[in-house]
Amino acid sequence: MKSFFLKLRKAPLTMLLSFLFTLIIYSITYAIFLKSLLSLVGIETLIRIIVLVLFGLFGIVYLIVSLRKMIQKKKMAFVLLTLLALIFSCIFLFASYTINTLYQKLDSISSSDTSTYTTVILTLKDTEFSQESKIGMITNEEDRSGYILPMEWIKKENIPNEIEYRNSYEELLSELYNKTLDAIFITKDYITLYGGEEPYLNLASETKVVKEYSKQMKTEESELLATTKSLTEPFTVLVLGVDSESTNGLDANAAFNGDTLILVTFNPKTLTATIFSIPRDMYVPIYNASGTSRWYGKINSSAALGTAATIQTIEHLTDIEIDYFVKVNFRGVVDLVDALGGIDVDVEAPNYSYYIHTWGEGRLCEQDSLRDFSNMICMNTGWQHLNGEQALAYARNRHGYTESDIARNRHQQQIIEAAAKKVLHNSNLSDFQKLLDTISKNIATNMKTSQILSFYQSLKGMLSNALQGQDFITIQKTQLSYYNLDVNGASCLGYYEGSMQAITKAMKENLGLLSIDTVKTFHYDYSEDYEQSADVIGKGIYTGERLYTMPNLKGKSISDAQAFANQHNLDLTIQYTTNEEEMDGIILDQDVAPGTLTKSFDAFTIYVNRVEKTSENEDENEQDETDENEESDFSKEDTVVPGNPTLD
């Protein structure tokens, strides 16, 4: 050993310094590279280990061989070996930078466990707010922006105003507009949540924020969804569309308006996805964030209660546990599609006559990504290449179709499918980085970075299929069979249980929760007409229980009311009253308002007109007397007629 050091001291100083410099650089860059590669959990583990071992061995070889070459004073061999070590060091730095950039962008997609919640005191534009103003507040004690923060604010600042409580934000806004309430507590995202609904299309210009109060709090989503499930096993994800007010990306915990709800199941083993677009106006039981309370409403109204409430509502609706959520900024769709170089879509021709009359046959027009009606995005229909603005316009449009939101759901599935196909055909590194940058700015999810990385194996399988000319993924399309439902004057959609059961059964089969009864062969062709496809699960099934609402019985007969009571197993109470100006025997009023869901009551009362007959009109009303004799069992006292439980 002593002789070795004596020989080393005789080596040229330049070679010795070069050796030490290169060895230090190689060791540092290798350590950085090692850390970066180890962060890619689940991605080509064997290859990563082999690469690290080989470069580690090279470092040892460089150490031993370089020392020998210095002692032997073989400069050419030493220089070549040193250059090779420096080249590898540069590769380490570049690879580490690329990997770390990828990891950081993926990490930015993951929602934080905490978020800043803000409640505001909202008034009409022309209302003067004072200590005498009456403020409305929601009754839901779990609502962070609508109840928890306002209560804390009231206590902290000794707000003296009178507080009145209502069951929903819709009630609060209605009474604010009717001036029954002077102000209301509501989330700062109220425009996103309600600005697209009648009668609040001008909500931004008709209201003003008087005061606001914010606090950093643990998110409902983090408490509800804390799964450690890897994306290498079957999983579910709920896609939520967000109309972000920001033009520069998406707040990871931004509110959404509930207009786009897409439940996806994916099986990495079979590379099969089932996509269920849920109509925004579907009338269902709405659950709060903890799932402990429920009431009926349009499913998009659950968005006002937060992501956790929407997830609880959909889980109860489908009996399928949701593992992940993904929020997608609608404005980001423009950048995403443009980053892909556009997508190819068969744009469905509008069929609503008024819309066709306005824009012309075979034309589709929609406001731009900023919802500016003065800058309409128009396109022809049929197969074509769409840019980002056109793709978003097509995904948003529902007024051109008689099916309205059902048609829009179908179009959104087309956009998703076309974009997914295009992603796997973008092999250029710069395009991929641009795409990743767009995704990281406009998507937020509860998936952790390690879970996102575990999806690599599925992407690898998809790419392999695509390169072999096969369908890169099997997509099971669904469409819920529905019917129109008028609830308290609001236009809603009911669904057929048979159709829902067919969809949820397919999703559970895809998740491996149910065994598949029959062997399914499925081939998805991107040129296939969605409407004509026989493989659309749930479409055309009109069986099972459905919802009904109370009809308007005014002006009808007792027999009409009795028939309705029998059909729905309701108790009917008859009260008689007198109105000389109305016809004898007709219903003058009812205690349950028309449009009330029959599931919400088990009895109702009708008020029937009974006019005393005189001798002057006996001959004219002989038939009426006969009818009255038939009804002689009814006295002027209240009469209860139970519904017939044997009738459906």
Image: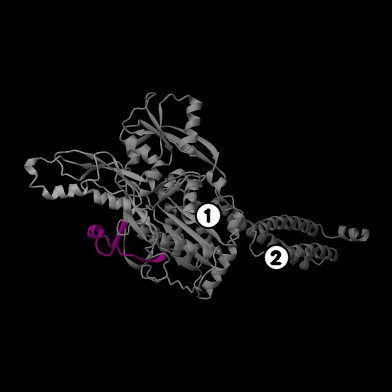
Above or below for 468 versus 250 = below
Could you say which disc has been placed on residue 51 in the image? 2
Which percent across, then down, holds residue 645?
37, 53
Decide: few, some or many residues near mark 2? Use Cα within 10 Å; few <14, some 14-19, many ≥20.
some
Q: Which element type, helix, strand or loop, lies under badge 2?
A: helix
Question: Is residue 246 visible from the viewing direction of this image?
Answer: no
Sooner in the amino-acid sequence: mark 2 or mark 1: 2
> Could you say which quadrant of the image residue 97 lies in?
bottom right
Residue furthest toward the right? 2
**Disc 2 to disc 1, how far (Cα)?**
38 Å
Q: Identify the residue at horizontal 25%, vertical 47% (top origin).
A: 553
Tag shown at residue 403: none
Dot 1 amino acid type = Ile
Magenta residue check for 640: no
The number of numbered badges drawn on the structure is 2
Residue 634 visible somewhere in the drawing = yes
Mark 1 — residue?
322
Tell me if 97 is positioned left or right of 532 in this view: right
Disc 1 element: loop
Nearer to me, 207 or 154: 154
Question: Which residues make up the magenta segment?
Answer: 343-365
Looking at numbered disc 2 in the image, what kind of residue is underneath it? Val
* Nearer to us in this view, 17 or 622: 622
